Amino acid sequence: MGMQMSEQLPDVTYWLALEISKNDQMINLDKVYQGSVELDYLYQLLTSKAQQHWWQTYGVQLNPVIVNNAFFRAVALLHERHLEFSRLRKGAETQWVKELLHLN
């Protein structure tokens, strides 16, 4: 209960990233990253869920600024991970793996 706000940000970011990635099939990270109705809905749903989770689990009332920052950091983190995965999957450095697995 004695957590400082700066200590909560990485934890809340990680928790939100996990929650977002649970529904990865339904979420278009490119659209969410650019802003959309999907982003607005996801923001409302998950920020409320995060605040409720932290209150019930840790007895901590999260500062709305922390939750806001954590949400957008989580989206950016997942978007960058998605871009990096897509880039590597199409890259020449994975060509030998594709040949090894007979995927060409």
Image (tube, rainbow, N blue to C red):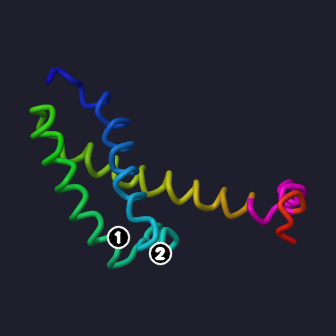
Horizontal relation, residue 53 to residue 100: left or right: left
Q: Quadrant of residue 40?
A: bottom left
In the picture of the structure, the residue carrying the numbered disc 2 is 31
- Report the residue at 36% width, 44% height from top: 13
Horizontal relation, residue 83 to residue 25: left or right: right
On residue 39, the disc is: 1
Q: Quadrant of residue 7?
A: top left
SS for tag 2? helix
* Residue placed most toward the observer, 56 or 102: 102
* Residue placed most toward the observer, 15 or 10: 15
Q: Position of residue 58 (x, y in %)?
A: 15, 32
Kind of residue indicated by mark 1? Leu
Q: Magenta-highlighted stretch: main secondary structure? A: helix
Q: Position of residue 44 (x, y in %)?
A: 22, 64
Q: Please say if the residues under marks 1 and 2 sit with CB atoms less than 8 Å apart.
A: yes
- Report the residue at 23% width, 55% height from top: 47
Q: Residues within 10 Å of mark 2 (few under 14, many from 20)?
A: few
Horizontal relation, residue 62 to residue 37: left or right: left
- Report the residue at 42% width, 58% height from top: 21
Which one is earlier in the sequence, the residue at label 1 or at label 2?
2
Q: Position of residue 52 (x, y in %)?
A: 13, 48
Kind of residue indicated by mark 2? Lys
SS for tag 1? helix
Residues drawn in magenta:
89-98
On residue 96, the disc is: none
The answer to whether residue 35 is above or below residue 13 is below
Horizontal relation, residue 80 to residue 34: left or right: right
- Report the residue at 41% width, 74% height from top: 26
User: Looking at the image, which residue sits at the far top?
Assistant: 2
Q: Please state, as top left, top right, bottom left or bottom right, where the N terminus lies in the image.
A: top left
Q: Position of residue 14 (x, y in %)?
A: 39, 42
Q: Please state, as top left, top right, bottom left or bottom right, where the C terminus lies in the image.
A: bottom right
